[in-house]
């Protein structure tokens, strides 16, 4: 039961419209292929008013960096979003 509690806490961290996107990025890309996308990235995007994939698609890497997303993470996000929409 303790293990299930920790698993639930982990899932609750990603309760966000963008949570499923960033969780999917972590699953697809993995740590070996790039920098991990964390909860901080979700919070920065939400604070900037980004709540959907369609809004995320419109952002450039530079705009993501202006929001406070690290350069490598911004590149990973842009790459993933482009592939997902093809």
Image (cartoon, helix red, strand yellow):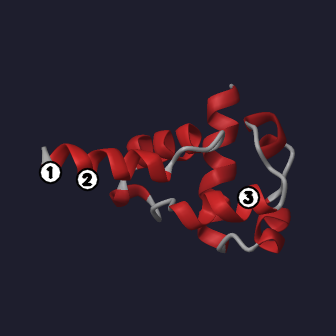
- Disc with the residue nearer the chain's start (1 vs 3): 1
The residue at the point 60 percent across, 43 percent down is: 80
Which structural element holds mark 2?
A: helix
Crowd band around label 3 with a 10 angstrom C-alpha radius: few (<14), some (14–19), many (20+): some
The residue at the point 36 percent across, 52 percent down is: 10
Of the residues tagged 1 and 3, which is closer to the observer? Answer: 1
Q: Position of residue 81 (x, y in %)?
A: 67, 40
Q: Which residue is mark 3?
A: 45
Image quadrant of residue 76?
Answer: bottom right
Q: Position of residue 34 (x, y in %)?
A: 45, 61
Q: Quadrant of the C terminus?
A: top right
Image vertical order of residue 50 relative to residue 66, above or below: above
**Gap between marks 1 and 3 measured at Cα:** 31 Å
**Gap between marks 2 and 1 measured at Cα:** 6 Å
Image quadrant of residue 21?
Answer: top right
Crowd band around label 1 with a 10 angstrom C-alpha radius: few (<14), some (14–19), many (20+): few
Q: Which residue is mark 2?
A: 6
């Amino acid at each position: 039961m303790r293990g299930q509690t920790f698993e639930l806490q982990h899932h609750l961290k990603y309760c966000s419209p963008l949570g499923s996107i960033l969780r999917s990025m972590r699953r697809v890309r993995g740590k070996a292929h790039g920098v991990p996308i964390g909860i901080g990235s979700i919070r920065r995007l939400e604070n900037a008013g980004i709540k959907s994939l369609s809004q995320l698609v419109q952002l450039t890497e530079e705009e993501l960096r202006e929001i406070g997303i690290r350069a490598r993470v911004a590149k990973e996000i842009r790459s993933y979003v482009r592939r997902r929409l093809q």
